[in-house]
Amino acid sequence: MVVQPLVVKLISFTCFVAFAVSFAVAFWVIIRVLCKTDCLVDKPEDQGLSWRERQARKRNRFDRYYVAEEFRSLRKAAAIAQTGCALSFGSLLLLGLLFGERASH
């Protein structure tokens, strides 16, 4: 059994915390955007339309997220959170490959 240095344990714990926080922020941004754009609910003016037309209107309401100025901060938060998730997860994988124990001895 190989004992890992304290530094490796601290770095891996930091990467895990960074991944958890980034994932939570990304999830929060998704929920916030879905709520602010009202793309999950049927609006009263959509009553009487076919299923396909209602879905197209919901998609159009969501598409505002990509261009509207009011969502600029959420777009930045989503980009930072997604980058943080990718980097911290990649760092955890790299640490596992470099310093992890082999399962088959």
Image (cartoon, rainbow, N blue to C red):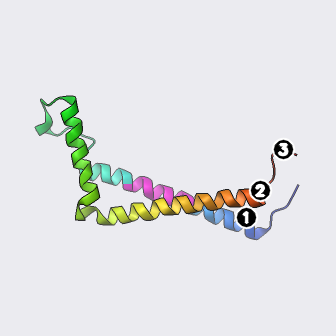
For image coordinates 22% across by 48% down, the residue present is: 61
Disc 3 secondary structure class: loop
Find disc 3 in the rendering and name its residue: 104
Where, quadrant-wise, is the N terminus in this rendering?
A: bottom right
Report if the CB atoms under discs 2 and 3 are less than 8 Å apart.
no
The residue that mark 1 highlights is 9
Q: Residue at x 36, y 50 (%)?
A: 31
Q: Amino acid at mark 1?
A: Lys
Looking at the image, residue 7 lies above or below residue 68: below
Front-most of residues 98 and 35: 98
Label 3 Cα crowd, 10 Å radius (few <14 / some 14-19 / many 20+)? few
Q: Secondary structure at mark 1?
A: helix
Residue 62, given in percent of the width and then of the height, sits at 26, 49
Q: Is residue 103 above or below residue 11?
A: above
Q: How many labels were placed on the picture?
A: 3
Q: Amino acid at mark 2?
A: Gly
Position of residue 50 measured from the top left corner of the image (x, y, whole percent): 17, 29
Element type where label 2 sits in the image: loop
Judged by depth in the image, the label closer to the viewer, 1 or 3, is 3
Q: Which residues are magenta?
A: 19-29
Residue corresponding to mark 2 = 100
Sequence order check, earlier mark of 1 and 2: 1
> What kind of secondary structure does the magenta stretch mostly adopt?
helix
Between 23 and 54, the one nearer to me in the picture: 54
